[in-house]
Amino acid sequence: MTTLLVNGRIHTPDSPDATAMAVTDGQITWLGQDGPGRAAHPGAEVHDLAGAFVAPAFVDAHVHATATGLLYSGLDLTGAKSRAECLAAVRAHAAAVPEGGVLWGHGWDETRWPDARPPTRAELDSAARTTPVYLSRIDVHSALVSTALLDTLPQARAATGYTEDGPVSRDAHHHTRGAALRAIRPDQRDAAQRAFLRAAATQGIAAVHECAGPDISSSEDLTALLTLATGVGQPDVVGYWGQTGEAELATRVGAAGLAGDLFVDGALGSRTAALAAPYTDDPAATGALYLDADQIAAHLIATTRAGLQAGFHAIGDAAITAIVEGFTLAEKTLGTPTLAGRAHRVEHLEMITPAQAEILGRLGVVASVQPAFDAAWGGQHGMYAQRLGADRAAGLNPFAQLARAGLTLAFGSDTPVTPLDPWGALRAATAHHTEGARISARAAFTAHTRGGWRAAGHRDGLAGVLTPGAPATYAIWDTGPLVKPAADSRVQRWSTDPRSGVPALPSLDPADPTPTCLATVLRGATIYHREDH
């Protein structure tokens, strides 16, 4: 059966002014104008778009599904405006935690609070009383934990990153996060994962990359998510497992690659990102380096020989130096074509020099990056500037530099670190706080569609674009007037020439309304449909 979409605005490189699209058996078979479309498909089921915008569905290249779903129904601290507000929320939720459970919360960010100080353990214990509490910081690389939880984990008190009266980080954080996750019942996990997948579909997202691993979730969590995603009506889930190893390990956990959150370092907000020079606001700290160049090279060699994709989490400049050195060592053993052919990934890639970007670009690396990080923490007075000083902070997240060096850009959210919001990510990338880091609207849209599919190994040029022969994976949007971006445009520069031959996009100006998703379709199957449309 053929479905013919008409009276719309179709984002396609084949016919920039297309208003109609035909889909047969989950594949796009025709694009063009309404009249010829109706004539060519007389028996088709016709769907009148009423002027809606149709574009390739988004891919979120870095998510944490269960943690995000738990945030939707649990203790959300992302909006807490002060330490007192954070503690009041803990006090209100603690009494409802069942026997044997843990109060799970996420999202506090002391850099946004008037006194810039997180609660002490004594303050947390006073608010929670006897309830075990785990509250991850916004970057999920440190957490506030109550004495009631720590009393069950003697190994955490002896681990690196433990502090007697403040947040825990490094190995101490990994122990406490693991304990909190084990306290979540299977039915809670299932509900959280379903809630996350529903939320993704409502945002026009047809696929996500789950970045799992032993220090961030569990193999049971990943297996449950991958099983759930095989059901009808769900976005695709590409699972990555952040642990060193070979093919047998990936097969055992059901992962597409040993990549994602395989930590080379931590995060800037928690002062665990590995730096070459100390943090400006803590001269005694340079972060944590979990893997060196030799270990990175060994992982790249093992995964490449096993036919797997490798990947690493790296943020600080010392971590990225280790990454580049590791790739260079692996290249000497494997050769450039063999290493580059696997399209290995680096997540975040925030503090990188042009010379380092050139090396990674030559080696076919995918840059899985999060534009919302700059929107949240960039600028002269943001968290980056607090931690690093304004000069170092201005060089973070250099999207234009990465693109020029030939890295594949794949956009994601790292949710629950930042929300699922693809259009917000496009705006952030085109309006980066540092002008020279901005990329064009066209490049940003490509990074959040085709880039995500390419990062997961779909390199045939069809995934993430609306063209005959491609999978019918798209989203339908209610949006305002469309504009045609020039090839090198920034958010404020658009072509008004209707003959430009460039597919139009909604305006990314923050003053204009964000498009509303009306439907999300994956290979011809509707996975979301707005009820009032």
Image (cartoon, rainbow, N blue to C red):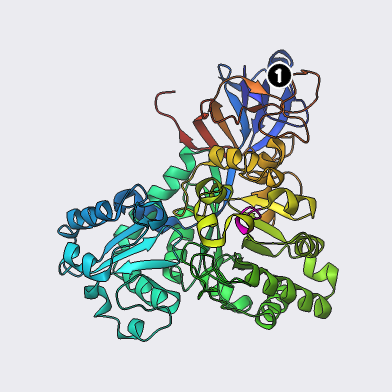
What's the amino acid at mark 1? Answer: Gly
Q: Residue at x 67, y 46 (%)?
A: 447
Q: Residue at x 64, y 22 (%)?
A: 482
| Depth check, front residue: 123 or 66 | 123
User: Which quarter of the image is occupied by the C terminus?
Assistant: top left
User: Which quarter of the image is occupied by the N terminus?
Assistant: top right
- Is residue 408 in sight in this rendering? yes
The quarter holding residue 106 reads: bottom left
Residue bearing mark 1: 37
Q: Position of residue 39 (x, y in %)?
A: 72, 15
Depicted 329 relative to depicted 225: above or below = below
| Depth check, front residue: 313 or 14 | 313
Depicted 460 relative to depicted 256: above or below = above
Q: Position of residue 262 (x, y in %)?
A: 56, 71
- Is residue 233 in sight in this rendering? no
Is residue 283 found left or right of 81 in the rendered image?
Answer: right
Q: Position of residue 126 (x, y in %)?
A: 17, 66
Question: Is residue 101 inside the magenta stretch?
Answer: no
Question: Is residue 394 inside the magenta stretch?
Answer: yes
Which type of secondary structure does the marked residue at label 1 adopt? helix
| Depth check, front residue: 530 or 357 | 357
**Magenta extent:** 392-397
Is residue 422 found left or right of 452 in the rendered image?
Answer: left
By secondary structure, the bulk of the magenta-drawn segment is best described as loop
